[in-house]
Image (cartoon, rainbow, N blue to C red):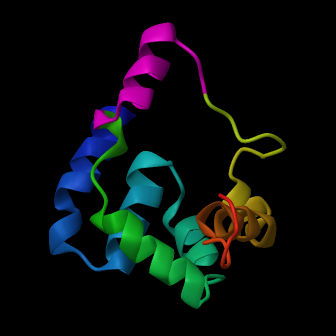
Amino acid sequence: MLEREREVFERAPAMSAGDWSRLWLTRVAGFPEEGADGWMGTWGEQEWAMAEVVRREAWAGAALVEALVRRIGVEVVVEGSGHLPPVEEPERCNGLLRRAWAVPGSGGKW
């Protein structure tokens, strides 16, 4: 899976946020084309902005945390998620992403 994700991230600079997101969802996450389109169809302005930010990020597989996870052989799972949370619970999934990417207000903490 990490190799597929690396390949998708290498293509990111030449793609739009929508095309890149669809490619990631189908190639890496294993969504059927209709599932990717269905979830992306629920995205609002915030989700599209997040997709653009993620498309421009460095590949996470190069991060030390990713190396540690692979080395100790654990799997990271979002508590309470189903097999395809964006398809099965798009509003909940979008809400989790919004909270994860939220910028705290003045004087707020991360």
Position of residue 103 in the picture relative to residue 2 (left or right): right
Q: Which corner quadrant of the image does residue 105 belong to?
A: bottom right
Quick check: 20 above or below 71?
below
Residue 94: x %, y % from top left:
69, 70
Position of residue 59 in the picture relative to residue 77 (left or right): left
Residue 91: x %, y % from top left:
78, 73
Quick check: 79 above or below 94?
above
Residue 106: x %, y % from top left:
66, 78
Chain part drawn in magenta: 62-75
- The residue drawn where x is 49% and y is 66% is 33
Q: Nearer the viewer, residue 110 or 79?
A: 110
Quarter of the image for the C terminus: give it. bottom right
Position of residue 33 in the picture relative to residue 89 (left or right): left
Q: Give the number of callouts.
A: 0
Position of residue 101 in the picture relative to residue 51 (left or right): right
Q: Nearer the viewer, residue 102 or 67?
A: 102
- The residue drawn where x is 31% and y is 59% is 57
Quarter of the image for the N terminus: give it. top left
Looking at this rendering, what residue extends furthest in the right direction?
80
Q: Magenta stretch containing residue 1, yes or no?
A: no
- The residue drawn where x is 72% and y is 41% is 78
Quick check: 6 above or below 27?
above
Residue 52: x %, y % from top left:
38, 76
Q: Magenta stretch containing residue 73, yes or no?
A: yes
